Amino acid sequence: MLDIEDLHVEIGEKEVLHDINLRIGDGETHVLMGPNGSGKSTLLMTLMGFSNYIVTEGRIRFKGEDITHLPIHARAQIGMGMMFQRPPTISGLKLGKLLAATYGDQPDRIREMARKLNMDHFLERDINKGFSGGEIKRSEVLQLTAQSPEFVMLDEPESGVDLENISLIGHAIGMLLEKDVHIVNRKKSGLVITHTGYILDYLDADKGHVMCDGEIKCHGNPREILKEVKARGYRECLECRQTA
Ligand code: ADP
Ligand code: MG
């Protein structure tokens, strides 16, 4: 579904990503880990097409099509969607209105969708205005559920979410990624950034990658990587270059 080749990305004339190579197959979910400032969010923002992330070398293909220079809305139309680490507040736009514009004007279905994320009391509120950290994350997952993208990008979906709501978010993300469908028939794929690994309990991720200093240094089983990182920290990732 997604094929990234030799990707180099600059922000404000500084090269942040160097030589990224990554392939994500149909129905697969990959997890991206790495220390703060290593370039994880930059990769997602670049994949979605934000214009201040400049691709200086390499290319991105989605479902076989070269999308390296497509604008954001065109990427959304062909099935890419993302949940932001820090989304903006949008004063004057009610969450319910945005969901209706995305999903279609079906108030009962939208309310039901919102209820599953404990967000049914937020439909009349401006997007993210005064929302707590965890409420923002639930709102983001709700917006993605309405969009139902084929390729789902999640930037730290569980950060700031209390334990009770992690299970709601986890189940909603599991549904977004069609984890209830056998991989042979599954149409959705995803790339998920996580620090804590809590979300792994709901994702059944296929592969993990560690990014350090703007490069992907290591691939492997996501749970094993997490265990290693918890035991020894990311420092060893800078020294060790193993691929699996
Ligand atoms: P992560 O998500 O892994 O914590 P980011 O992708 O957000 O890391 O950031 C990677 C690096 O790029 C950091 O050093 C960050 O300060 C830098 N960076 C991000 N956005 C900008 C920007 N708009 N201008 C300059 N530097 C940026
Ligand atoms: Mg980030």
Image (spheres, rainbow, N blue to C red):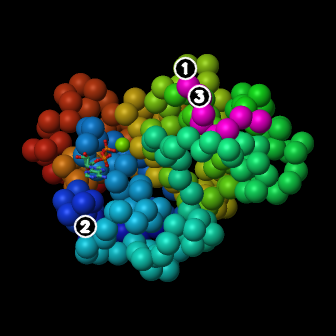
Residue at mark 3: 130
Assess whether mark 1 and mark 3 are in contact (beta carbons under 8 angstroms).
Answer: no
Of the 4 image quadrants, the one containing the C terminus is bottom left
Tell me the number on the disc at residue 162.
1
The tag earlier along the polypeptide, 3 or 1, is 3
The CB of the residue at mark 3 lies under 8 Å from ligand 2: no
The span shown in magenta is 124-132
Amino acid on which disc 2 is placed: His
Amino acid on which disc 1 is placed: Asp
- Residue shown at 33%/42% (left/top)? 33
Mark 1 lies on a secondary structure that is loop
Residue 39 in the figure: left or right of residue 206: left
- Give the x, y percent position of residue 100: 79, 52
The tag earlier along the polypeptide, 1 or 2, is 2
Was residue 62 drawn as part of the magenta stretch in this picture? no
| Vertical side of 214 occupied by 138: above or below | above
